[in-house]
């Protein structure tokens, strides 16, 4: 498993570009005797393993894509592709699921059907949708679905999940301010947009602080401010970009409404025009309460510690798209207390977590598709 992961880590591929990764996955699954279909949702792979006479099916999912980040680990297995890096551990996720396929194919211990879903383009929030749009549920039906994600800071061998919301929705926005640029020495001759843009950035921070109920968990983050100005020219166009996190559709809708009100008010005050582009990229990841409890019970048999996570994360995950159609559970497993953060150029998946993740996948299958 370590050799597999190091090979995948050296050859990272971004969303919908995972051709080499998908070919490796398909070849490995076929070598284990599974039925394999490639090209699901573009570059996705689905493997099917049947044992016994049971008519129920459980799906296990792993994401395969890398990030557009230049690696800075200096490790022997570091990325050999400039500007691409497995900085979120999807190489490890892929290998853990391959390891689970080997365990279940060689040892059995379940009665029914297991679907192994190797998904493209999770980082874009488009891969799960692409597989669903390609008829995943109709072509490869399953009753439940489970996924794992590594967690820096959590000790290797530990597992966590929770019922209900475990990860947030992510909305992205772009607000364009348009006025009339001009010479920096005479701002009165135009309607420059730098001051309004700065006011907008500050005012957006009041949405969570002053417009949402204190009991609501939400984040509004401005991540970019781009203009067409230069050192001695006031800009006539500015773009303010960022993202928002929330756990309820009503909260997302309120954030958008407040954002539009603020942008229009600032535009009116400064005599400029505005356009707000607000898009919902990820929906909240909502675990089935009963299946979350079942998954924790399965984890307790193979983990050093299996615990209930007290609070959800404000990160997002497109595994949520599967949970919108089929009940299931998303879990976190430890990547080590000294792990670099996810999406950092110094991050690396912990090889010691590979057998734990494979065993956890298999344990969930055996609990949900029992032989007796």
Image (cartoon, helix red, strand yellow):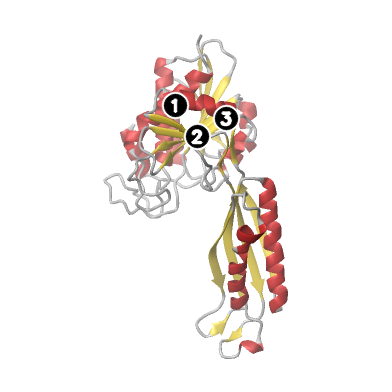
Rounded to the nearest whole Å, what is the CA distance between mark 3 and mark 2?
A: 12 Å
144 to 16, vertically: above or below: above
- Residue 143 rendering spot, x and y as whole percentages: 60, 24
Q: How many marks?
A: 3
Whether the residues at callouts 2 and 1 have beta carbons within 8 Å, the answer is: yes
Question: What residue is drawn where x is 57% and y is 60%?
Answer: 242
* Percent of width and height locating residue 192: 63, 80
Along the polypeptide, which appears first: circle 3 or circle 2?
Answer: 2
Closer to the observer: label 3 or label 2? 2
Q: Is residue 158 above or below residue 153?
A: above
Query: Is residue 190 visible to us here?
Result: yes
Q: Which residue is situated farthest in the left direction here?
A: 76
- Where disc 1 sits, the SS reads helix
Q: In this rendering, is residue 32 above or below 216?
A: above
Which of the numbered marks, if any, corresponds to residue 145?
Answer: none
Give me the residue at 39% from left, 44% from top. Answer: 152
The residue closer to the viewer here, 169 or 67, is 169
SS at mark 2 in the image: strand
Instruction: Read off the residue under disc 1.
Output: 299
Determine whether label 3 and label 2 are within 8 Å by CB.
Answer: no
| Nearer-the-camera pick, 227 or 164 | 164
Q: Do we see residue 100 in this rendering? A: no
Image spot of residue 30 (x, y percent): 44, 24
The dot on residue 328 is 3
Per the rendering, the mark at residue 161 is 2
């Amino acid at each position: 498993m370590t050799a597999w992961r190091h090979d995948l880590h050296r050859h990272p591929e971004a969303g919908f570009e995972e051709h080499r990764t998908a070919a490796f996955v398909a070849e490995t699954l076929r070598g284990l005797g599974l039925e394999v279909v490639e090209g699901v949702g573009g570059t996705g792979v689905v493997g099917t393993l049947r044992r016994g006479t049971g008519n129920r099916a459980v799906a296990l999912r792993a994401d395969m894509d890398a990030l557009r980040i230049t690696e800075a680990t200096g490790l022997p297995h570091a990325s050999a592709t400039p500007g691409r890096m497995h900085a979120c551990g999807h190489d490890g996720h892929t290998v853990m699921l391959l390891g689970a396929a080997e365990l279940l194919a060689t040892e059995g211990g379940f009665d029914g059907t297991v679907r192994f879903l190797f998904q493209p383009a999770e980082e874009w929030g488009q891969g799960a949708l692409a597989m669903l749009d390609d008829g995943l549920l109709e072509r490869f039906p399953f009753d439940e679905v489970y996924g794992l994600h590594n967690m820096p800071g959590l000790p290797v061998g530990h597992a966590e999940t929770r019922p209900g919301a475990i990860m947030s929705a992510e909305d992205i926005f772009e607000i364009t301010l348009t006025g009339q640029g001009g010479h920096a020495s005479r701002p009165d001759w135009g309607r420059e947009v730098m001051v309004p843009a700065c006011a907008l950035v500050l005012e957006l921070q009041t949405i969570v602080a002053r417009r949402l109920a204190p009991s609501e968990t939400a984040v509004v983050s401005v991540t970019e401010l781009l203009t067409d100005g230069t050192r001695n020219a006031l800009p006539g166009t500015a773009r303010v970009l960022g993202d928002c996190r929330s756990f309820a559709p009503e909260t997302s809708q309120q954030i958008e409404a407040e954002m539009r009100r603020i942008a229009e008010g600032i535009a009116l005050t400064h005599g400029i025009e505005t356009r707000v582009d607000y898009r919902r990229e990820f929906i909240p990841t909502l675990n089935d309460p009963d299946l979350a409890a079942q998954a924790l019970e399965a984890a307790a048999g193979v983990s050093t510690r299996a615990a209930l996570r007290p609070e959800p994360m404000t990160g997002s995950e497109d595994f949520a798209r599967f949970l919108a159609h089929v009940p299931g559970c998303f879990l976190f497993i430890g990547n080590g207390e000294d792990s670099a953060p996810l999406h950092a150029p110094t991050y690396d998946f912990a090889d010691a977590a590979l057998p734990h993740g494979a065993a956890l996948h298999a344990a969930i299958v055996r609990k949900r598709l029992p032989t007796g």
